[in-house]
Image (spheres, rainbow, N blue to C red):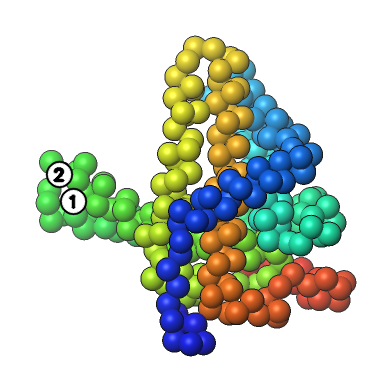
Amino acid sequence: MKSPLGLEANLPVMDIIRESLGLLWQKRELVLRMFLPALFILALVDWAASAFIDERSLLQLGFALASLILAVLFATAAHRFTLLPPEQWYASALHAWKAEEFRYLLRIIQIVLCAFAVIFALVMVLLVVLGKEMAPLAGVAGILPGFYIWGRLSVTLPEIALGQRTTLKRAWQLSAGNGSRLVLVVIVVPVLLMLPFIALYAADSLLLNYVAAFGSYITSLISLVMLSLSYRFLLDFYDGGDESRQLPEDETAADQNSGFDA
């Protein structure tokens, strides 16, 4: 994909990371008011499910569903917080489950299925060619392209959170030439930020396990802001901030965007 001037974007990953951390720190009082309760609740749900509910219990399914619903609401709110003007934060960033959340969840499922299909196909082919004794190598070789697909298709998740109708094709076009950079933004950097908290799960302490869950969601907030800023950079570069792709402010436009197709 090229800009109107025939140029291709190079996503500035380090600048995106710095801008994300700077935005969260600069708006820290508002971030705490908007997201701290959600962070506590999300961490509590995950912590309680792992600490007190038997893994074979049907209650695990209920906790998993609750965690999924809350996580989608948290993600869409984080995207809106990053991309919307300040006067729309409370009106649009935080709300109950709507069509945008359904489309957001549907897009995540589509991305996971696409990435899994690529991984599964490549691993099967490599196992046939290399033999079962090379299964670890086949696994790594299959996962890397899956991550590439995941990173590129994730770029329009913020667009869905803003109530826009978008497609996997648009995600692929918008992310052209930035697949490896988006893998850094979507997967590598978030995992690196999360590693210290993941290590706490190994501790035999309920308190440290809760800290691990809470910290993991803090890093998730950072990664959501990074993805939002990456989307805005690519959108501005290629579409020139086309007003037709901004969040509609009047009720008529909002109603037009309330369908369930992503």
Q: Residue at x 45, y 19 (%)?
A: 202
Horizontal arrangement in the rendering, residue 66 relative to residue 143 (left or right):
right
Q: What kind of residue is marked 2?
A: Met
- Seen as rendered, the residue at the extreme bottom is 5
Instruction: From the image, tell me which residue sits under label 2.
Output: 134
- Seen as rendered, the residue at the extreme right is 251
Q: Residue at x 42, y 72 (%)?
A: 176
Q: What x and y, as percent, mark residue 204?
A: 49, 12
Q: Nearer the viewer, residue 112 or 17?
A: 17
Tag shown at residue 127 = 1
Q: Element at badge 1?
A: helix
Q: Nearer the viewer, residue 133 or 191?
A: 191
Q: What x and y, as percent, mark residue 238?
A: 53, 78
Could you tell me if residue 199 is visible in this image? yes
Given contact means CB atoms under 8 Å apart, are the residues at marks 1 and 2 in contact? yes
Could you tell me if residue 54 is visible in this image? no
Q: Residue at x 87, y 72 (%)?
A: 251
Q: What x and y, as percent, mark residue 30?
A: 77, 44
Rounded to the nearest angstrom, the CA distance separating label 1 from label 2 is: 7 Å
Q: Tell which tag, 1 or 2, sits nearer the viewer.
A: 2
Tag shown at residue 7 = none
